[in-house]
Image (cartoon, helix red, strand yellow):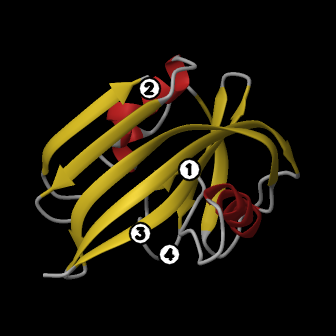
Amino acid sequence: MKMIERQTTLLYLLRGQQILLAMKKRGFGVGKYNGIGGKVELGETVEQAMVRETQEEIGVTPLKYQKRGVLVFDQIYQGEHLVVGVHVFTSDVFHGEPKETEEMSPGWFDINQIPYNQMFQTDKLWLPILLDSHSNFNGTFKFNGDLDTKLIDYKLEIK
């Protein structure tokens, strides 16, 4: 099976003690809460992709943002061996109010009431690091199938 590598972005908007999560309405991750993001297109930097995806998915433009880490997910998805690098950002300075689109339905959550049971299983492992500290982090996660199957191994490093 041929391995496909892909680079993606993931942004979490923060407001006081709240985090913006969005319910995915179609495509990869449908029915789950997540941050905002998507694929890095040819010729884009990860920062450009993160801003574009945020504008497309919830109508908001991040004005100041911090890259917090890179997560690598090694999985089988729709019969393909995917290794996906996810560049994780946070922003607390942005323009516009989050709005629902065909792809995402955003909402603000208290950081102490995050709906982990409606998110990817790995989010509960690394999202608290993002919220509890100003540290950067890297992680790798290996599955025996897609992101909803058994997590075989993982490593998290706080920098």
User: In this view, which residue lies farthest toward the top?
Assistant: 133
What amino acid is labelled 1 in the image?
A: Gly
The answer to whether any part of residue 91 appears in the image is: yes
Read off the residue under disc 2.
Answer: 128
Mark before the other along the chain sequence, 2 or 4: 4
Under tag 3, what secondary structure?
A: strand
Q: Residue at x 54, y 25 (%)?
A: 131
Q: Quadrant of residue 140?
A: top left
User: Looking at numbered disc 3 in the image, what kind of residue is underneath it?
Assistant: Arg
Residue in the image at 43% along x and 63% along y:
31
Separation of marks 4 and 1 at Cα, in angstroms: 14 Å
Residue 26: numbered disc: 4
Question: Viewer-proximal residue, 146 or 83?
Answer: 83
Q: Is residue 81 above or below residue 133?
A: below
Among the two numbered marks 1 and 2 on one chain, the one whose residue lies closer to the N terminus:
1
Give the CA distance from mark 2 to mark 4: 26 Å
Callout 2: few (<14), some (14-19), or many (20+) C-alpha neighbours within 10 Å? few
Q: Residues within 10 Å of mark 3 (few under 14, many from 20)?
A: some
Q: Which residue is mark 3?
A: 6
- Which numbered disc flags the more N-terminal residue, 4 or 1? 4
| Residue 107 screen position, x and y as percent | 66, 47
Residue matched to label 1: 35
Coordinates of residue 152 in the picture (x, y in percent)? 10, 47
| SS state under label 1 | loop
Does the CB distance between marks 4 and 1 fall below 8 Å? Answer: no
Give the class, few, some or many, for how many residues have Cα within 10 Å of label 4's Cα (few <14, many ≥20).
few
**Amino acid under disc 2:** Pro
Q: Amino acid at mark 4?
A: Arg
- State the separation of the CA atoms marked 3 and 4: 19 Å
